[in-house]
């Protein structure tokens, strides 16, 4: 069995900048994914943005994945996923950070293990994207300038894109006050 060598040029730059850090990388259908330890995320993202051989000047998306019940073995329950684009080099790179919850809170409380450094100082457009991940998954971003819910109301009791959230909700609809045109 042969092991394929990943040819994305940014991987060599990152490995050269962080020789003591163990990274995981994979390629699927021409798309390269780099898995970064959560403690080193901000440093790696800065190199990916600032190094001339990388020059990832555009943050396309920030999202998250909940691997609860995933059929294959996984590193952690959650992953924060950053999609980067370099206009200069016409390259894309996906950067992933795995996070494992420490509390069994059923998605109703802040878990200190579900926290990564914000990249809003590197890409200002990350502000709303990180807020959406916080709102839907409960993953917090240290250093975010305005981390509050963006899609749901402030006191919403859970994080609806977690896979342990019931499909029919937790009684939120039963507590709505029905508003009609006449009640304004």
Image: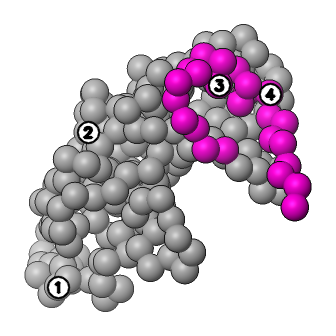
Query: Circle 3 — which element?
Result: helix
- Is residue 118 shown above or below 175? above
Front in this rendered view, residue 17 or 52: 17
Report the residue marked by disc 4.
9
**Above or below — where is 56 with respect to 6?**
above
- Quarter of the image for residue 168 reads bottom left
With 97 as the anchor, is 158 left or right in this view? left
Spatial CA distance of label 3 from label 2 is 32 Å
State the separation of the CA atoms marked 3 and 4: 11 Å
Percent of width and height locating residue 110: 17, 53
Q: Which circle's residue, 2 or 4, is located before the other in the chain? A: 4
Q: SS at mark 4? A: helix
Q: Which residues are magenta?
A: 1-25
Front residue (pair 126, 21)? 21
In the rendering, at what x and y percent does residue 51 appear?
Answer: 66, 13
SS of the residue at dot 2? loop
Spatial distance from mark 1 to mark 3, Cα to Cα? 49 Å
User: Is 173 in front, or is 55?
Assistant: 55
Q: Which residue is mark 1?
A: 171
Could you tell me residue 177's position as x and y percent?
A: 12, 78
Q: Position of residue 21 (x, y in %)?
A: 52, 29
Direction front: furthest residue = 1
Any magenta on residue 21?
yes
Q: Mark 2 highlights which residue?
A: 147
Disc 3 vs disc 4: Cβ atoms closer than 8 Å?
no
């Amino acid at each position: 069995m042969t092991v394929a060598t990943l040819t994305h040029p940014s991987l060599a730059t990152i490995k050269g900048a962080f020789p003591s850090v163990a990274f995981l990388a994979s390629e699927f259908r021409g798309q390269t994914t780099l898995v970064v330890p959560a403690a080193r995320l901000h440093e790696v993202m800065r190199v990916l943005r600032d190094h001339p051989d990388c020059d990832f000047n555009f943050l396309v998306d920030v999202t998250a994945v909940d691997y609860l019940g995933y059929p294959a073995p996984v590193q952690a329950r959650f992953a924060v996923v950053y999609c980067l684009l370099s206009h200069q080099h016409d390259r894309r790179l996906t950067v992933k950070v795995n996070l494992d919850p420490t509390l069994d809170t059923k998605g109703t409380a802040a878990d200190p293990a579900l926290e990564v450094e914000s990249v809003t100082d590197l890409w200002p457009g990350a502000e709303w994207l990180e807020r959406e991940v916080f709102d839907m998954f409960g993953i917090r971003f240290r250093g975010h300038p305005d981390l509050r819910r963006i899609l749901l109301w402030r006191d919403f009791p859970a994080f609806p894109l977690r896979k342990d959230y019931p499909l029919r909700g937790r009684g939120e609809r039963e507590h709505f006050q029905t508003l009609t045109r006449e009640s304004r």
